Amino acid sequence: MSNKNNTILIIDDSKTNIGTLSAVLELHGFKTITARSGKMGIQRAIYAKPDLILLDIMMPGLDGFETCCLLKADDGAKNIPVIFMTALADMESKLQAFDAGGVDYITKPFEEAEVLARVKTHLTIGRLQQELEARNRELAALVHIDGLTRIANRRHFDRYINQEWKKMRREKGCMALIFIDIDYFKQYNDYYGHQAGDECLKQVARLFDNAGQRPADLAARYGGEEFVILLPNTDNTGAKHIAKSIQTSLQELQIPHARSTVSSRLTCSMGIAWCKVSDQVFSVEIFIGMADAALYRAKTQGRNKFIISDKN
C-alpha cells in the first residue's frame, strides 16, 4: 500500500526533532504536518484528522500525557492512533503513556528503521480496524434488510413500530398502517415461475418503499407476498392518499397476471388502520390487528381494493 495517502502529525517542541522525523517520513512517501506545542497539536489533529500522531512527552505547557488525554476526549480525534516519543525509558513512563491512550512508544534518539516500522504497523492496524468496523456496520444493516427485496424486514418493522409508537404517545400524535397483499401471488408463481415471482416482489417492494415520502415512513416485507407501510403522524386521509397512489403506480407497472381473477395485470389488496396513539384503548398489537383485519376484508370483498378499519 502506498504511503502517500497517509498523513502523520508530529507534535514536538524541538524544531530539530520535527525536521529529522519529517525528512525521514517524507522520504518514504508520507505527508507530514507539525505542531510545536500540545495545544497547537490538538487543534491540528481535530482540523486535519491525520492518520497517526507522533507525540513528544516532554514539552512545556501541556506535556504529551495531557495532550493525549485531551485528544482521546475529543470525538473528532479520539480514534487517531498516538505513538509517544521520549528520552524517558523507565517503565513508569511507558505505562503512563499507554494509560493516556497511546498505542506505542519510541525512545530517543530515533532509529529510522524503528520509526518507519512502528508507523507502518499502526497504520495497517488502523486501516484493518476501519475496514472491520465498516463491515460490522454493513452486517448490522443486513440484519434489518430483507434479502430478496432489499427493503426493511419483519424484524426491523417490529422494532420500528414499537419505537415510533412510544414517540407518538409522547407527542400525542397519530399513526397509520397499511397492510398489503399481492393478489393471487401463488398463482402468479405457479404460472410464471419462482424466478419471475422474485422479480415481481422486487418491483413492488420498490414501489411500496417509494410510496412513503417522509424520512419516518417505513415500508417492510412482512412475510411472503405481504408488505406493510408504517406512516407516523398520518391520519386516515393521508393513508388513503398513499393507498390510492400505490394503486395508480402498480397499474402503471403493467405487470401481466394471467391467473388473476380480478385483472389481467398484477393488483394488490390493502387494509388500513389509523389511530391517535395517545388513546389508551390502543396498543401496538391491537393496531396491527386492525390493519390485518381490514386487509382480510379487502380480500374477501373482491380484492384489488383497500379497506379502512372501522375500529378507529
Image: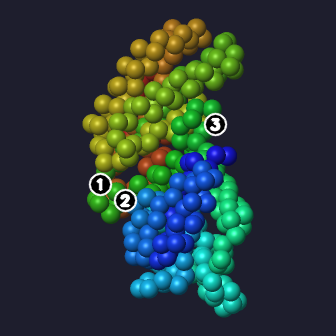
Residue 167 image label: 2
Q: Where is residue 48, by image quadrant?
A: bottom left
Q: Which residue is mark 3?
A: 147
User: Is 270 on the left or on the right of 114, as rendered?
Assistant: left
Separation of disc 3 and disc 2 at Cα?
A: 29 Å
Circle nearer the N terminus (2, 1):
2
Q: Is residue 273 left or right of residue 6?
A: left
Q: Which percent across, then down, holds residue 138?
A: 60, 47
The answer to whether 246 is drawn above or below residue 260 in the figure is below
Locate residue 217, reporting x and y percent. Answer: 39, 42
Viewer-proximal residue among 137 and 75: 75
**Looking at numbered disc 3 in the image, what kind of residue is underneath it?**
Gly
Question: Are the two marked residues, 2 and 1, in contact with CB atoms closer than 8 angstroms?
Answer: yes
Q: Could you tell me which residue is drawn at 57 percent across and 60 percent down? A: 23
Real-space Cα separation, disc 2 to disc 1, in angstroms: 8 Å
Residue 293, image x, y percentages: 48, 39
Of callouts 1 and 3, the N-terminal one: 3
Q: Could you classify mark 2 by the number of other residues whose Cα lies within 10 Å: few (under 14), some (14-19), or many (20 or more)?
A: some
Q: Amino acid at mark 2?
A: Lys
Number of on-image labels: 3
The residue drawn where x is 45% and y is 31% is 208
Q: Dot 2 lies on which element?
A: helix
Q: Residue at x 57, y 48 (%)?
A: 4
Q: Nearer the viewer, mark 2 or mark 1?
A: 2
Which residue does the numbered mark 1 point to in the structure image?
173
Nearer the observer: mark 3 or 2; the answer is: 3
Q: The residue tagged with tag 1: helix, strand or loop?
A: loop
